[in-house]
Image (cartoon, grey):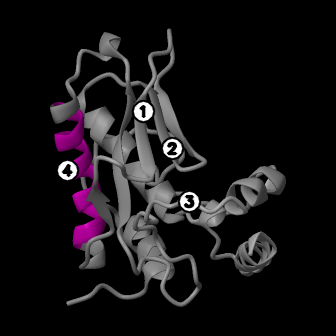
Amino acid sequence: MNRIYVAIAVAVIILGGGTALYFYQNPPASSTSALASASTPTPTPTPTVPSQSTSAPCGQPITYTVGTLDTRFGISQASLLRDSEYAKQRWEKAAGRQLFAYQPDGVLKINLIYGTGQTGGSYTNGSIDIYGYSDQIQLTRLLARLFGSALGLGPVNDPSAVMYPQNQGTNEKLTAADTAELNALCGAPHA
C-alpha cells in the first residue's frame, strides 16, 4: 500500500499537481523532502488548494490563515485579516471569482515577522512573510502583491503596478499590467 501511495505521489509531483507544488511557480529546492512528506498518508482531509494544471490554475480558492503575528507590529489578528480581505479582493474583483478563502487551518500562512530596519516581504513555500511596513496602505499593497505571488503571478515592469517588484507606489488599484498578468494566468474574468 505504501509503495502504491509513493508511486502515485511521485507521478502527481512529476505532472506538477502534487501537494508539494501547489503554490510554487518553480519546484522547491529539495524535492526529496516533498516526496518524503507526500509518502506518509495523513488521516485528515486535504485542505482546499489551487489547481496547478495549465488549464485552470485559478480554479479553486487558496485557503489562508494567520501564522506568526509578532506583537511589536501593534496590529491585531482581526485587523490583519481585515487588511488581507481588502488585499485579496483586488484580485478577486479583477478575476470575477473567489481566489482566496480564509480558514483557521488554511494552507497559506500570513506571517508578520518583525525585522529591525526591514520593510517589505516575501512569498516562499506557501508562506507570506512581512518584515515591516510604514502604514496600512503599504501593508495592504504588500499583501496584495504577495497574494498575487501565491497565485503564481510574476513581476511586471509598471512601477505603479501592485506586482512591481518594489513596493514603491501608493496606488491601491490593480493596473492594466496587473490585470493582464492575472488574465494570462487565470483566463478571462468570469461574469
Residue 160 visible in this rendered orientation of the protein: no
**For the residue marked with disc 4, what is the amino acid?**
Tyr
Q: Residues within 10 Å of mark 2 (few under 14, many from 20)?
A: many
The numbered mark at residue 86 is: 4
Q: Residues within 10 Å of mark 4 (few under 14, many from 20)?
A: some
Local secondary structure at mark 3: loop
Residue 46: x and y in percent read: 46, 65
Q: Earlier in the sequence, mark 4 or mark 1?
A: 4
Marks 3 and 1 sit apart, C-alpha to C-alpha, by 25 Å
Q: Are marks 2 and 1 in contact (CB under 8 Å)?
A: yes
- Magenta stretch: give its range: 79-93
- Name the residue tied to disc 2: 127
Q: Residue at x 17, y 32 (%)?
A: 79
Q: Residue at x 83, y 54 (%)?
A: 32
- Name the residue tied to disc 3: 42
Quadrant of the rendering where the C terminus is positioned: bottom left
Front of the two marks 2 and 4: 2
Near-viewer residue (103 or 101): 103
Q: Earlier in the sequence, mark 3 or mark 1?
A: 3
Q: Reply above or below: 103 against 167.
A: below
Local secondary structure at mark 1: strand
Dominant secondary structure of the magenta stretch?
helix
**For the residue marked with disc 2, what is the amino acid?**
Ser
Q: Residues within 10 Å of mark 1 (few under 14, many from 20)?
A: some
Local secondary structure at mark 4: helix
